[in-house]
Amino acid sequence: MKHNPEFLQLVEQARRRVKECSVAEVKARLDHGEQFHFIDVREDQEFAKGHARGARHLGKGIIERDIETVIPDKQAPVVLYCGGGYRSALAADALQQMGYGNVLSMDGGIHAWREAGYPLE
């Protein structure tokens, strides 16, 4: 998918402020039984077509509105992902601005997860 330049600039600015992790790091955390919130921020129809096993859905369009209800502990570990890592970086940036201090964006998103052969639901 070709993204517009202004969108890419916005994502790049967000990426300077957020921490990112790889799909392998997330999979290792899951395999080791680490407790963290694994959140898919894609659109409803994208999530319905398939998502990383164990992920919960909280779309980018509503995450700021609903996050405090879903994850009231602002120090809880949270890993966000989207299709390729762009929207999750933007969402992670917004959550940090809301006071969430332990948020990661999964670089490569569900595309990298699928390419790695990791489990889907």
Image (cartoon, helix red, strand yellow):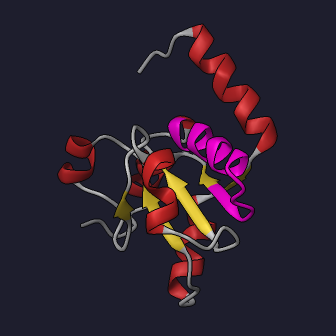
Extreme residue toward the top, this view? 5
Residue 8 against residue 111 in the figure, above or below? above
Q: Position of residue 60 (x, y in %)?
A: 43, 41
Q: Position of residue 121 (x, y in %)?
A: 24, 67
Q: Position of residue 56 (x, y in %)?
A: 36, 65
Residue 56 against residue 87 in the figure, above or below? below
Q: Which residues are magenta?
A: 87-104
Q: Position of residue 96 (x, y in %)?
A: 71, 50
Residue 7's image quarter?
top right
Q: Who's the residue at 71% across and 65% down the image?
A: 102
Residue 55's image quarter?
bottom left
Q: Viewer-proximal residue, 72 or 118?
A: 72
Q: Is residue 8 left or right of residue 110?
A: right
Extreme residue toward the right, this view? 16
Q: Who's the residue at 71% across and 34% down the image?
A: 14
Residue 5 against residue 98 in the figure, above or below? above
Q: Who's the residue at 66% across and 22% down the image?
A: 10
State the predominant SS element of the stretch in magenta: helix
* Residue 103 is covered by the magenta coloring: yes
Residue 23 against residue 111 in the figure, above or below? below
* Residue 121 is covered by the magenta coloring: no
Q: Viewer-proximal residue, 60 or 121?
A: 60
Q: Who's the residue at 63% across and 50% down the image?
A: 95
Say how many tags the image has.
0
